[in-house]
Structure formats: structure tokens, C-alpha cells
Amino acid sequence: MFNFDEGRILQEHRNGLGIVSATEKAVDEIVARGYTNIFYIGIGGTVLYASQMAHIVREEGSTIPLFVENAADFCAVSNPHFSKDSVVVIESISGDTKEVVEAVDKAHEAGAAVIGYVEKEGSPLYEKSDYLITTTGGGYYFWYTVTFRFMYHAGQFPRYEKFFEELIHMPENVVEIYKKSDSKAAAYAAAYQDEPIQYLVGSGNLEDWATCYGMCIMEEMQWMRTRPISASNFFHGTLEVIDKDTSVILIKGEDKTRPLMDRVENFVHKISAKVTVFDSKDYELTGISDEFRGILCPIIMRSAFQRVSTHLEYNRRHPLAIRRYYRRLDY
């Protein structure tokens, strides 16, 4: 495979495993001192990662007091549930995203503690986090650890130790997902790179991945027009604009909402000749129990779609790093 650095991928996911202990310690200290609720805050892709975790919390039947807020909304509109006894969990790769920094400042003004994941040393979030978690490529591992540790302390995730014992196998599994997904990713990019619009459909903990990939990769990094939609809303508007020439990407996972995706898949195959299905069931997870496959679909699909990004970049002759406006103009 071209543009594939197996060693880097392995290292980044091992980095993620490497922050589990520090993240556990941060949550343990918060729980020991007491808190009233938890605010997951981010913007762009990071708030969508957080939303994926919130879906997992709901599906696991947890009642931990969790709110997910876009950093810009959090700064503009005061949430009446937020107080000095809240705990903020926040991620920013760069550590200097304007809205994220403002959200941390607002949290501190209220007296709330901040657990921050950041990859850039010396950045504002790096300096301002009360509990700093830092590495490269470990974002999902941060979110899983924070989420399940709070649930564990609430007596609502008794499989905690088993999950993290098995999670150590994910770096090698991720490499295999990259390899297995490459041919489908290449075929998709070759066939549909210049479509006028791409529809991405997801459900459950992959609904926000559909939004994330459409917004953060296709739109921001490839300037492709997209329409992400949840399977639960698909039959309330979107179905009427699908025809035989509409490019549709279905992102199927293994949580309780999979039947919603099955229904959409059954419909679009009758109408469109341009349907691409990425299904988590196509990827083996060695050393991972079936009971955790649905939970791990966010990592599975992010890994598979990394190859889509690689092939779109190559076929469109459009480097992923190019921006027209983002951080180039004042706005």
C-alpha cells in the first residue's frame, strides 16, 4: 500500500494505551473529591468524538450525569447545570483552538476542574489543564478511559478490567483494518471522487463519525460537498433526494442501532447505483471479545476511513493539509 506507515500507526495507538493510567488517575482524583456532573467539550471533530462516547454511555444504560457541549455554544450560552462542582473533559490536538481555550477559561472562572487531552506541548490547553493528558494519536483512548472510568466508579461498567485487558490488542488490529479496507477505499475514491455531493449515513456511535468525516475530511480537507445524515432521520426527508446517480456511503456498526442501518441499506440499494458500504463486521478484532466490538466501532471506522482519505488525496491531487480559509483569514 502506498502512503502507509505501519510503524507510525502502531506507535500512535500504543501511545493511546500509554495514557490510560494517567487518565485513570485524573478521574480517580476527581471522583475522590466529588463532582456533580461531567461536561465533555470540544469543537469540530473533538466534540463529535465526545458525542460518540455519550452514545455508548446511553447504550450501556449508564446514568452518569453527562453533558456534551460544543465549545462555542458553551461560551455563548450558559448551561444552567454547570457549576464549580462540574468537571470539564476537553480535547484539542493543537491545544490552541480559540473556542476551546475560551471554554477552559470560562470553566476556571466558575471554579470547575479541567481534564485536558492535548498533543502540542506549551500550547494554552497544555498550560491551563488541571489534569493534563498528552501524547500523539491517543485521542480515542483518552475518551474511552475517561468515560468508562467514571462509569466504573458509578458501579455501571463492571467489565472495566476485561475491556482494558483486551484493548491492548487494538494497535495490531488497527494495522490490519488499514490493510483490509484499502481496496474498498481505493475503489470508492476512484469511482466517486468528483460526485457533486456525497451522502454519508451512520447510526448509533457512528452517526457522529458520518458527520465528522463529511465535515472535517471531505469538506475541510478535500473541499467536497457532503450531507451527513443519521439513519434515524434518513426516512424523514433525505430519501426523497436519492436517485440512481446519488453517491451514498453507509457506515455500519454493531451496536443496537444496526437495524436502522439495515433499513437504509435495503432502501438505497433499490434506488442508487452508487452505494458504498463500510461495515465494521468486515474487520476481524483479534483478542477482542464480541461483547466489545460494538463499543470499539469508532476506532474501527476511523481506521478504515484513513485509507479513504489517502486515496481521495491521491486521486484528486489535493493534499489533505491545504486550506483556503481555515486559520488563514480572520473570521
Image (spheres, rainbow, N blue to C red):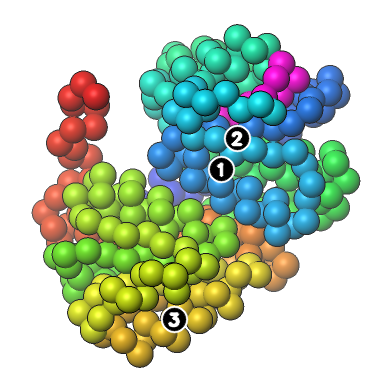
Query: Counting other residues with Cα less than 10 Å from the Cα at mark 1, is it few (<14), some (14-19), or many (20 or more)?
Result: many
Q: What element carries label 3?
A: helix
Q: Residue 50 carries which label?
A: 1
Q: Which mark is residue 138?
A: none
Q: Is 289 drawn above or below residue 25 in the view shown?
A: below
Q: Specify the quadrant that holds the N terminus.
A: bottom left
Q: Position of residue 167 (x, y in %)?
A: 66, 53
Q: Alpha-carbon distance for marks 1 and 2?
A: 6 Å
Q: Is mark 2 on a helix, strand or loop?
A: strand
Amino acid under disc 1:
Ala
Q: What element carries label 1?
A: helix
Is 231 magenta? The answer is: no
Q: Name the residue under label 3.
A: 265
Q: Position of residue 58 (x, y in %)?
A: 70, 54
Mark 1 and mark 2 in contact? Answer it, CB < 8 Å: yes
Q: As drawn, which residue projects farthest toward the right?
A: 155
Quarter of the image for residue 275 reads bottom left
| Side (left or right) of 270 relative to 86 | left
Mark 2 and mark 3 in contact? Answer it, CB < 8 Å: no
| Side (left or right) of 322 relative to 273 | left
Q: Specify the quadrant that holds the C terminus.
A: top left
Start-end of magenta stretch: 82-92
Residue at point 55%, 75% (across, down) = 260
Q: Where is residue 20 in the image (x, y as percent from the top left)?
A: 67, 37
Q: Position of residue 322 (x, y in %)?
A: 18, 39
